[in-house]
Amino acid sequence: MAYAIISLGGKQYRVQEGERLLVDRVPTEEGKTFHPDVLLLGGEGTFELAPKAQVTVRVVGSALGDKVTIGKYKPKSGYRRKTGFRAKLSRIEIESIGGGARRSAPAKREAPAKAEAPKQEPEAAPTKLPGGYADLTVAQIKEQAAGWSPEEVEAALEYEGAHGNRKGALAALEARKDG
């Protein structure tokens, strides 16, 4: 029997296909489906942590929880308070686990093949970029930009646009370019 552990509203639930649950109110409308976070998928003696499979859940209805009464009292002072609330809940039904098709347990667990990441060559810096530009701080760029040629300023602007999140460097280079 396949089961899954899902996370809804900061709580975890162990669910099976066809099961109905009463959970904290979900933002999905009644009659619509959604896919909660799946933490574990298991069954037939095996399990899988952080699976890529989805669990489809349909919102059947909404309800109010039991009334909870809260009373406060301080002796000898006449302080008494009585309040209460009813939790807003949703009724959900688990339609499918693992994308609708029931999973069969693998005969033997195999280690996943290690795929080698393609080696990325560092991008070639523009030819007119000032020497050691990538290691300069924003303050150093502001100081040194006054002595750079227009080609070097253009190359530095292109480099910052492609690589950097340094807004101060972009501002200094644009000011140098315009001035």
Image (cartoon, rainbow, N blue to C red):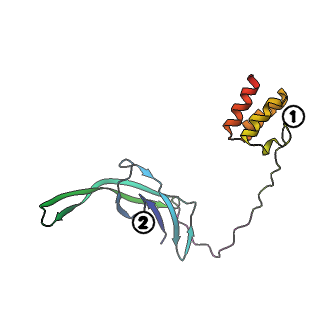
Residue 145 % position (x, y): 79, 32
Vertical relation: 164 (above or below) 157 = below
Q: Amino acid at mark 1?
A: Lys
Q: Nearer the viewer, mark 2 or mark 1?
A: 1
State the residue in front, 160 or 89.
160
Whether residue 113 is in magenta: the answer is: yes
Q: Is residue 132 magenta?
A: no
Mark 1 Cα within 10 Å, few/some/many (few <14, many 20+)? some
The answer to which image quadrant residue 157 occupies is: top right
**Label placed on residue 75:** none
- Residue pictured at 58% horizontal, 72% vertical: 105
Closest to the observer: 79 or 41? 79
What's the magenta region? 101-114
For the point 21% across and 58% down, the residue is 84
| Residue at the disc numbered 2 | 13
Please count the marks in the image: 2
> Which residue is nearer to you in this view: 177 or 2?
177
> According to the image, label 1 marks what residue?
128
Instruction: Report crowding for label 2: few under 14, some 14 to 19, many 20 or more residues within 10 A (C-alpha).
Output: some
Residue type at numbered disc 2: Tyr
108 vs 151, left or right, is left
Q: Are marks 2 and 1 in contact (CB under 8 Å)?
A: no
Quarter of the image with the C terminus is: top right
The answer to which image quadrant residue 45 occupies is: bottom right
Label 2: state its secondary structure. strand
